[in-house]
Amino acid sequence: MTGHLRGRVQDAVIVGGGAAGLCLAHWLTRTGTEVTLVEAPEGPLRPAERTWCYWEAGAGEFEEAVAASWRRLRVRGPDGEVIESDPAPLRYRMVRSGPFERLVHSRLAASPTAQVLRATAHEVREAPYGAEVRCTTAGGQPLVLRGRRVFDSRPVRVAPPHRTLLLQHFRGWFVHTALPCFDPGVADLMDFRVPQPGHGLAFGYVLPLAPDRALVEYTEFSRAPLTAAAYEAALRQYTEDVLRLGRFTVESAEQGVIPMTDACFPRRTARSVFRIGAAGGATRPATGYTFAAVQRQSRAIAAALHRGHPDVPRPHGRRALAMDAVLLRALDTGRVDGPRFFTGLFRRVPMERLLRFLDGGSTPWEEFGIGLRTPAGPMLRTAAELPFLARRTTGRSEESPR
């Protein structure tokens, strides 16, 4: 394969085989675009299995990779208040990275215009014909891939200048209980019945897979991750004292850090070099969700290239980003109480409308109505001060496993 690629200028080279790279490769091949997807070989550069979640109406393009889905969603307040709703036509879905990768690989293998290469990408730089990617193959040989356009999904290690940078950091257990403990028809998006940190907020997150199996996570929005021992202690407290699961075994675990920031991620770093996925700002700043935005962005890129107008559109609209910036700053300063804020929002706003807002699908009038249901004083004060705050470059961004 490397001999076939050497020296040729392809339509597109995609660097990184995570959700963004796989989605874009899939949609580009659907338009007949010649694509080479560069994935890291087996070893430390390949991420562990991850879970991605999103909500969608109807069956989507990757429905075969959906491990589980839920019609009903629930939020629990600090005092135990339960807010439960069916956000029809939306349905909450879980995708595991392994089955998703196998599904997309099978589709790429069936396409005459797609190739998957296991190699380590070291450098992406502009070239007269577009851009080139300097790699080392799995066998240790140097290789230069040439493309009219290069789409780079590798994580950005240092966050761009920002006014606020919080981290959504979490650890989750896939548990198997001795007795039935879960309702497979309901997912808990936020359960605030956990001790709250001195800065930020914390909640539990439960995705039932069967009456005796579930993904149970402890999540914090704060400025710094916890130690491994602290995550384990928080999960023990949540599963034993709050959920009261009784005897259970931990079948596997996952852990991650997602940046929640008002930084502006550049989507174009050279004339023919584009950033996609979380590296290009696809992570929704106020929630940490990425997968749905990646799908939208990939479809839009493929359509633009097919029309002859290469572009990487904004993953999120300007209004949504502006509102997220206000919320992040209000949470970071402590002007709003996180558990009360989110519980109140889910109580006062129909869940389907709120989820559409969080996915960028709401109207300005709906967004105005949602804004009226937030603490007016703290939010207005925060919105007024944001334009006068300097952006700084401290802080680190890491790849999202969700």
Image (cartoon, rainbow, N blue to C red):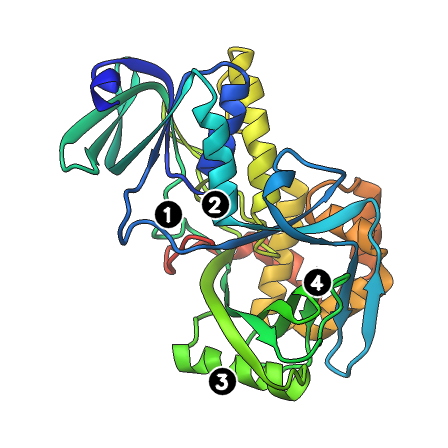
Q: Are marks 1 and 2 in contact (CB under 8 Å)?
A: yes
Marks 1 and 2, how far apart in space? 8 Å
Considering the numbered disc 2 on the image, is that residue within a helix, a strand or a loop?
A: helix
**Which badge, 3 or 2, is on the more N-terminal residue?**
3
Q: Within 10 angstroms of label 4, few (less than 14), some, or many (20 or more) residues?
A: some
Mark 1 or 3: in front is: 3
Of the image marks 2 and 4, the number of the one nearer the N terminus = 2
Can I make out residue 201 in this image? no
Badge 3, how many Cα within 10 Å: few under 14, some, many 20+? few
Residue identifier under label 2: 278
Disc sitting over residue 379 in the figure: 4
Q: Nearer the viewer, mark 2 or mark 4?
A: 2
Q: Is residue 243 above or below residue 184?
A: below
Which element is circle 3 on? helix
Q: Earlier in the sequence, mark 3 or mark 4?
A: 3
- Secondary element under disc 1, as helix, strand or loop, is loop
Q: 122 left or right of 275?
A: left
Q: Which residue bears the numbered disc 1?
A: 156
Separation of residues labelled 3 and 2 (CA atoms): 30 Å
Q: Find disc 3 in the rendering and name its residue.
A: 233
120 lies left or right of 368: left
| Residue 209's disc number | none
Q: Say whether marks 3 and 2 touch (CB < 8 Å).
A: no
How many marks the image carries: the answer is 4
Neighbour class for label 2 at 10 Å: few (<14), some, many (≥20)? many
Real-space Cα separation, disc 3 to disc 4, in angstroms: 34 Å
Which residue is depicted at the point 71% across and 69% down?
211
Query: Closer to the camera, 236 or 301?
Result: 236
